[in-house]
């Protein structure tokens, strides 16, 4: 990541944090506010980070995936559904139910990814159309089942949504979480922690293993990769499915870690913002993660401004309006895509069908 | 024994019907799969589809409602198809439609007050509809210009514009443009003035079919004429087929990209404006939800051909309209329609699957619809 991009990221985060610190200064010390903002930022950046990593696996192997949004939505629904079934129908305690839910979410992501792979690699459908199909299919299936299973004729739940088994518990990272005030940053839930670990793992896999080298070869120059004996089709399939698992874990964040209920279209464009984070991070895991943090900070800004609503001075009354502040991540995404902040270079064969 | 003339006729008929074959089989397969899903969740697929057809075509009122539902689908489908022809994927029809509706509603209810006078319909209607078209054109033109001049990919930008439009309309409909009537509990604008309303075709209660439907059919002809009979249309199609060749041929590629997206947005904005001026007489939050994705499915099902889009839009309108009766008769949630539509889109987009299942050989060349991030 070049210094200019890093400077922009730092500047944007400082402005966002600074705004809240200035507004909240009469109620809390800057350190407390910054700590709380950082904790929120890391938490809400989780699905964006996982979505961006999902995109990195797909696109480094040469497959454009704009279906991440749909994969996350489907995973959020089926993970939540699995947890509810385990808990209320099979009477398992909350913890095993939630774990089954996370596994179901990850597998759902993988299944949608398999569909994307079949469409775009085997049937050579335009990859952007293929991704759109996934998005529409996920919206339709989750919307239909959400109503049919709970309110439809013959529903085992007979018209009411049962209580979900809650959300995944917070993990205190030993030592770090014990630091006074700042320790709050190190109390995170498991998916948020695994997202950060997966950034490190993905970096290692992509740039330090044979698998990663082959993946990148397939995404940059599939013909050359094929010539030296790499199975292009198989590598693309595997990477798209791994990407699907990650998107599935990102989906689990919505219904098993953030809140314990499902709403229609609750992913709200996060899958697309994740793609923007991937692009801004120049298709590298750490780049994508820092970009995801910027979007996380934008969301943390919105949440914290709501919290300090009464303290906002009248000159800045516009910030009291959550709709206006809510524009920040979307405007930021568009600004980033213009490339004025620095040119990004996608893998050379990204989006191209490979024909022998 | 068949005569050669007869053989020639059958062959020619086959050639004529060939483009219809894959869409037809895609719909057929999706309907079968939809039936299986209904069966799996414990419903009766035959009864459900019977209710669907009855609700969509069973009476003059049902037919009128199908036309009413199809109207915005025709406009929005044309919008997406125009983008595709220019090599641009407009996923933002939803936001453009919402903005068109907001602008038309604003001119519709507020303009007489601003001017302190009543306005005759032949001025007020074009102004309200024109405002909607302009708003849609701006909302589509921004991502178009960003694509042309900075390379920011229109797929993500149009989606971001959808969310921005949603936030802004939420703000407007809950704030400055909210219906001040004390009985109003929802985020909606006041009713537009009578002078801004496009009348229904028949003066019969329950027959809501309006002149907007006729305008939609005319618009399909206009888009066809624009794309295939004008220089501008030729330039749009050339840029869509091969931007490098277009550049060497002296076409201003950046301007054409911006213009294509603006025109696409204008058509989507028109859809919103007509819904406000001819049907709802106000804009209410959330009414535009889902139109953007449906429009993509319609454009692809209609093979980006304006007349194909009319057929696809009427099919989608009929399904949306009939689904209410289906839900009433069989308790199958209307959302099953979204699943069937997604399956139709799946099979139309991946026509290789349909050709594979039904063993049809491909004749047509592959058409490039979109391009990767490189831009």
Image (spheres, coloured by chain):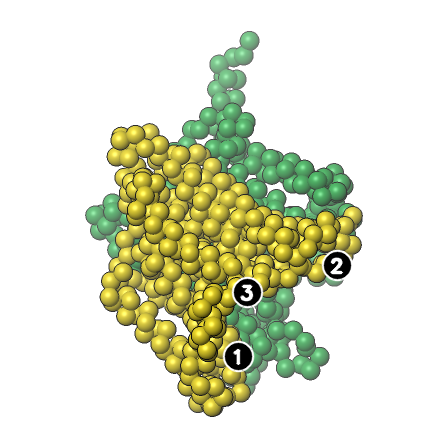
Chain colours: A yellow, B green
Looking at the rendered structure, whether the residues under marks 1 and 3 are on a common chain is answered as yes
Q: Quadrant of residue B40?
A: top right
Q: Position of residue A153 (x, y in %)?
A: 77, 49
Of helix, strand and loop, which one carries label 1? helix
Asked whether the viewer can see residue B288, the reply is no
Of helix, strand and loop, which one carries label 2? loop
Q: Residue furthest front?
A: A175
> Along the polypeptide, which appears first: circle 2 or circle 1?
2
Quick check: A80 left or right of B11? right
Would you call the spot at circle 3 few (<14 residues within 10 Å), some (14-19), or many (20 or more)? some
Q: Which residue is mark 1?
A: A306
Estimate the spatial distance between the alpha carbons at disc 1 and disc 3, rounded to whole Å. Answer: 24 Å
Quick check: B31 left or right of A314? right
Q: Quadrant of residue B280?
A: bottom right
Q: In the drawing, what numbered circle is on residue A160?
A: 2
Residue displayed at 42% across by 54% down: A198
Q: Position of residue B41 (x, y in %)?
A: 71, 43
Query: With respect to residue B356, does A162 lie above or below?
Result: below
Which chain does tag 3 point to? A
Judge depth for marks 1 and 3 and give the one in front: 3
């Amino acid at each position: 990541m070049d210094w200019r991009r890093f400077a922009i990221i730092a500047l944007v985060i400082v402005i966002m944090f600074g705004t809240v610190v200035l507004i909240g200064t009469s109620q809390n010390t800057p350190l407390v506010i910054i700590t709380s903002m950082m904790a929120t930022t890391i938490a809400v950046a989780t699905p964006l980070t996982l979505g961006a990593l999902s995109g990195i696996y797909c696109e480094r192997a040469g497959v454009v995936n704009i279906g991440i949004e749909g994969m996350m939505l489907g995973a959020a629904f089926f993970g939540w559904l699995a947890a509810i079934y385990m808990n209320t129908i099979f009477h398992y305690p909350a913890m095993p139910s939630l774990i089954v839910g996370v596994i179901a979410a990850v597998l759902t992501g993988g299944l949608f990814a398999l569909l994307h792979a079949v469409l775009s690699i085997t049937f050579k459908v335009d990859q952007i159309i293929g991704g759109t199909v996934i998005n529409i299919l996920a919206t339709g299936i989750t919307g239909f089942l959400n109503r049919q299973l709970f309110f439809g004729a013959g529903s085992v739940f007979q018209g009411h949504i049962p209580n979900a088994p809650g959300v995944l518990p917070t993990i205190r990272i030993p030592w770090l979480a014990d630091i006074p005030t700042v320790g709050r940053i190190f109390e995170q839930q498991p998916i948020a922690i695994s997202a950060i670990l997966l950034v490190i793992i993905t970096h290692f896999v992509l740039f330090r293993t044979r698998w990663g080298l082959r993946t990148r070869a397939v995404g940059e120059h599939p013909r050359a990769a094929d010539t030296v004996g790499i199975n292009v089709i198989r590598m693309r399939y595997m990477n798209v499915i791994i990407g699907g698992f990650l998107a599935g874990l990102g989906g689990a964040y919505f219904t098993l870690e953030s809140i314990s209920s499902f709403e229609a279209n609750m992913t709200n464009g996060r899958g697309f913002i994740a793609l923007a984070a991937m692009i801004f991070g120049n298709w590298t895991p750490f780049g994508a993660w820092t970009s995801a943090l910027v979007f996380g900070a934008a969301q943390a800004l919105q949440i914290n401004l709501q919290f300090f609503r009464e303290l906002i001075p009248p000159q800045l009354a516009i910030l009291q309006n959550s709709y206006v502040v809510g524009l920040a991540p979307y405007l930021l995404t568009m600004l980033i895509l213009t490339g004025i902040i620095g040119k990004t270079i996608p893998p050379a064969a990204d989006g191209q069908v490979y024909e022998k | 024994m068949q005569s050669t003339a007869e053989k020639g006729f059958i062959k020619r008929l086959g050639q004529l019907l060939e483009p219809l074959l894959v869409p037809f089989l895609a719909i057929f397969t999706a309907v079968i799969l939809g039936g299986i899903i209904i069966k799996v969740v414990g419903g009766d697929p035959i009864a459900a589809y019977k209710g669907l057809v009855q609700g969509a075509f069973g009476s003059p009122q049902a037919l009128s409602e199908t036309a009413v539902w199809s109207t915005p689908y025709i406009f929005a489908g044309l919008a997406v198809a125009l983008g595709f022809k220019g090599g641009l994927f407009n996923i933002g029809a939803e936001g453009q439609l919402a903005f068109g509706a907001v602008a038309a509603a604003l001119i519709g209810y507020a303009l007489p007050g601003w001017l302190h006078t009543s306005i005759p319909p032949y001025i007020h209607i074009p102004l309200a509809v024109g405002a909607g078209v302009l708003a849609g054109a701006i909302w589509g033109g921004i991502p178009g210009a960003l694509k042309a001049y900075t390379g920011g990919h229109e797929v993500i930008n149009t989606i971001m514009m959808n969310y921005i439009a949603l936030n802004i309309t939420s703000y407007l409909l809950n704030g400055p443009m909210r219906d001040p009537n004390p009985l109003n509990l929802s985020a909606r604008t006041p009713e537009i003035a009578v002078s801004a309303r496009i009348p229904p075709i028949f003066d019969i209660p329950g027959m809501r079919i309006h002149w907007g439907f006729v305008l939609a059919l005319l618009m399909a002809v206009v888009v066809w004429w624009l794309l295939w009979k004008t220089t501008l249309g030729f330039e749009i199609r050339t840029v869509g087929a091969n931007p490098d060749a277009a550049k060497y041929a002296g076409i201003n590629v950046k301007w054409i990209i911006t213009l294509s997206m603006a025109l696409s947005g204008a058509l989507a904005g028109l859809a919103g404006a007509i819904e406000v001026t001819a049907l709802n007489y106000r804009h209410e939050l959330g009414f535009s939800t889902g139109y953007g994705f449906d429009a993509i499915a319609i454009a692809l099902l209609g093979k980006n051909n304006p007349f194909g889009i009319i057929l696809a839009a009427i099919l989608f309108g009929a399904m949306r309209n009939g689904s209410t009766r289906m839900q009433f008769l069989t308790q199958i949630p209307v959302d099953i329609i979204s699943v069937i539509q997604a399956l139709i889109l799946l099979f139309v987009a991946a026509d290789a699957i349909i050709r594979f299942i039904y063993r049809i050989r491909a004749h047509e060349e592959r058409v490039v619809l979109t391009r990767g991030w490189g831009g």
